[in-house]
Amino acid sequence: MPDSMDYFGSENEIFRNKELLQVSHLPDGDRIIGRENELTDLANAIKPATRGNTPNNVLVYGKTGTGKSLCSKFITNQAIERAKDNDVSIGVAYVDCLQESTETQAVQSAGHQLNDQATTDISIPHSGLSTSEYYRRLWRIVDSRYDVALIILDEVDKIEDDDILMQLSRAVESGALTESTIGVIGISNKVRYKDSLDERIKSSLCEREYVFSPYDATQIREILRSRSDAFHEGVLEDGVIPRVAALAAREHGDARKAIDILRFAGEIAEESDLESVTEDCVDHAHEREETSRLAELISKSPSHAKLVLEAMALLTQQKEGDNAPVTTNEAYDLYKRLCERDESDHLKLRRVRDILSELEFLSIIEQERKWAGRGKGNYMENRLIDDPKVIIAACNESE
């Protein structure tokens, strides 16, 4: 390889601290914009924990990117520090139920995070134990290490079995915990999630409920400005942050997507060897963010789910408007033709209906049952949430 060729390019002149634009970054309190009331509500709900008492269980609702996870993590971290002043020990476990989607996985994850094997002499293996044994070890860890445990179940609607909510919310009442107490913060994108719960779980879990509304353009602009020191001084053109904020507010009010678009814009400026981040970079970044997000989600789907989704997108393009409805039978007919194109056997209509329901669960499509008229029964209308062009690009990228 020639010594003169430098594949890493020049020194980074765009980003100063790129970590500030990562989804996993937990900002200081003064960087959390437009959520003062929500932080106060959460603090009031779990305040008893800072004195060693049982906190209120909480359900937090709101669309993706409205600050639910961010505020929950921030306020529980602050509770840990406040409790120390009262000589109270709080442990916090954050469980991503999209990744840890079974009861066993979620309990194992919580136990692993709360454990210190050198202190408890309790092991939490990644597999090999029954669900009940994971629970027993979790209770022993909490009782031996903490006065209070706070368990955040993010995207709780994705978990396969609601029994974990019953077990956690009634751990003290059932005698599973004898020395400590526990509180649950459930986070869901689905405002009607509570309606799907068993009545016993509702009575023990749903003590406080809070809804996080989408950010408006002004709030998103302030959020982006609070993180603008991720870039070197002077590299952001004046119109960049207002442009990102306007795009995000118009489409979703999702601060997480807005931050991603700003990061992508910086990366595009770097790749293009530009001295500054421009509004053109933002427009390219917006396209990249949409495709990247969907490609990541779609890449985890089975091949037939991708074909069903491609059929939906193609049919939507043929109709007027990006939000045109597609019936299940229409989608199924085109899906079968796509299977013939790919020389693969098609699934039965019943299984395609299941796939469409799964796509709705992932918030890729929306479904609405319609009445066809007297004697004709009902039928399902399916609508894409995203632009069909973006869906098709994401399907192709994920192959």
Image (spheres, grey):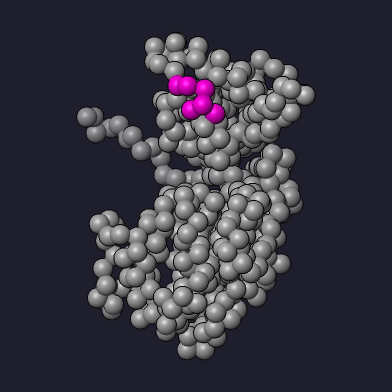
- Up the image or down, 310 lies above or below 247; here it is above
**Residue at point 42%, 26% (across, down):** 303
Magenta span includes 82: no
Residue 63 percent location from the top left of the image: 64, 49
In this view of the protein, which residue sits in the foreground, 379 or 323?
Answer: 379
In this view of the protein, which residue sits in the foreground, 318 or 36?
Answer: 318
Q: Which of the image's four quarters has the C terminus?
A: top left
As drawn, is 317 to the left or to the right of 353?
Answer: right
Residue 375 percent location from the top left of the image: 74, 22
Residue 146 percent location from the top left of the image: 42, 80
**Residue at point 45%, 10% (across, down):** 341
As drawn, is 138 to the left or to the right of 366?
Answer: left
Quadrant housing residue 209: bottom right
Q: How many marks?
A: 0
The secondary structure making up most of the magenta span is helix
Q: Residue furthest front?
A: 375
Magenta span includes 350: yes
Can I make out residue 304 in this image? yes
Q: Residue furthest left?
A: 1
Q: Residue furthest bottom?
A: 86
**Residue at point 55%, 15% (across, down):** 334
As drawn, is 8 to the left or to the right of 281?
Answer: left
The magenta stretch is: 347-353
